[in-house]
Amino acid sequence: MTETVSTEPTGLHRPPPRSGLLIGVLVLSAFVMILNETILSVALRDLTVDLRVPTTTVQWLTSGFLLTMAVVIPTTGFLLERFTPRQVFLFSLSAFSLGTLLCALAPGFAMLMAGRVVQACGTAVMLPLLMTTVMRLVPPERRGATMGTITIVIAVAPAIGPTIGGAVLSSLGWRWMFWIVLPLSIAALVTGALRLRLESERRPVPLDVPSVLLSAIGFGGLLYGLSSTGEKGVEPPVPPWLSIVVGVVSLAVFTWRQLRLQRRDRALLDLRPFTYRSFVLSLVLTALLFVCLIGAAAILLPLYLQTVLHTSTFVSGLAVLPGGLVLGVLGRPVGALYDKVGARPLVIPGAGAVAASLWLFTMLGAGSPLIAVIGIHVLLMAGLGLMMTPLFTESLGALPDNLYSHGSAILSTLQQVAGALGTAVFVSVATLGSADAAATSPDASGLRAAFVVAGCVGVVAFAATWLLRKSTGAVAAPKH
């Protein structure tokens, strides 16, 4: 293919005069929703005691949330073609609000998990809607800066989730994490219902149900198998190796089916974005980035602060706040810089900072000062901030406008799968590496082993960044 990105999307009218308001409504709504990815991370220890389940089971409240998003997001290409953006938005916020209510009322782990799944169904639809809307309304020369705003949503929300969760948990019960969010989600729903108007071209494309089932079995089997390997003293109903094999085979069949269906323009997830080199490389780097962001920064670090340094949930939440703020502050400036210099000069040093910070975490122990932990976390977040916006913009900017919705669905899916994989693998490694086999939470040796694995991921990401092509900025014609 030799298609280039068009600055005037086909099938759409001129951008509405209040496009800034439309994007603002979507950004604020997504912020509230994505905040819930990690808001429970500081409550894992409390939930383990309160619900009487091991840490490797409780962590499914986070990894299960991400996994559900990974299963649902592939359907968003279909949804954005079949329904109007307003209809998709109303479904998204309605599902999220219902799931939040279920979580707040949950009497035990089962209903709490169900509420998280419903929440995730709503959140999953919002991400591609937001990214597709930006690519259609914002001209190429300003996409970096606008994507910087989206970075605040996608990265800062999960980064400050532990801070908010810790503040709530220190004075109120874990249910209040949901009672506080519920009125915010309802307010976003009402605002969007009144203000969100965006014209789009619709096609009566059919939903391929077998593809949805294959996606669910594939991602679910893979994540269940990885998570089950870390459970001590519990015999899983399905052997972990079998679950992983079923997951991999299902994903292979899913890919084969999409390649066949897209010949008739009926694929659930169009895989043609994978024919663009810049998209594929940016996608791989984004996946590695989210393994570190969700698995290491949002899950391992709060566990280390609480189980090794024995800090309170409030203090552990505050400890990760500076890093989250740094990530937010870098969003738009890095995006604007990307518009001028391209991705390579930003992503390479960013990946270097990420790798260095993850290896510094392996040197921490029971006597490490809290200020050192905060400093390393700030370095990690700064590195992620230099990488995230350029990679998002580089990946979608390489695609023609007719593949935006499917490209954003692929990108969003891999983000959630990577985050869920990072969570499952790191918690499993931390649990298996702990000296006390009977402990319900990982100890210092187990967490150090998990950070070593995370450090290896960081090194791989740093090496891969050197494959990025030099460019003169986001307005350059895409190559693949």
Image (spheres, rainbow, N blue to C red):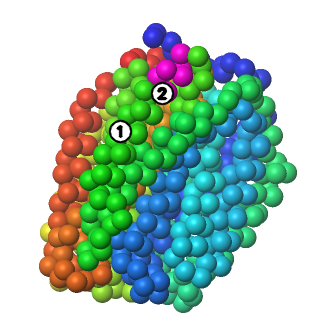
Determine whether 17 is above or below 121 in the image: above
Q: Residue at left 20%, top 69%?
A: 432
Q: Residue at left 45%, top 34%?
A: 254
Q: Residue furthest right?
A: 194
Give the image quarter of residue 308. Answer: bottom left
Magenta: predominant secondary structure element? Answer: helix
Q: Is residue 291 magenta?
A: no
Relative to the observer, which residue lies in front, 398 or 339?
Answer: 398
> Residue tagged by mark 1?
249
Query: Which structural element holds mark 1?
Result: helix
Residue 257 is marked as 2
Q: Residue at left 27%, top 39%?
A: 348
Residue 79 in percent (x, y) is at: 67, 37
Residue 111 in percent (x, y) is at: 58, 73
Residue 454 placement, left or right of 51: left
User: The residue under label 1 is which amino acid type?
Assistant: Val
User: Callout 2 environment at 10 Å: few (<14), some (14 to 19), or many (20+)?
Assistant: some
Residue 420 placement, left or right of 203: left
Quadrant holding the C terminus: top left
Determine whether 55 is above or below 409 in the image: below
Q: Are marks 1 and 2 in contact (CB under 8 Å)?
A: no
User: The residue under label 2 is which amino acid type?
Assistant: Arg
Stretch in magenta: 258-263
Q: Residue at left 34%, top 31%?
A: 281
Residue 159 in percent (x, y) is at: 45, 62
Determine whether 457 is above or below 305 in the image: above
Residue 116 in percent (x, y) is at: 56, 65
Does any portion of residue 178 appear in the rendered image?
A: no
Relative to the observer, which residue lies in front, 404 or 383?
Answer: 404
Does any portion of residue 92 appear in the rendered image?
A: yes
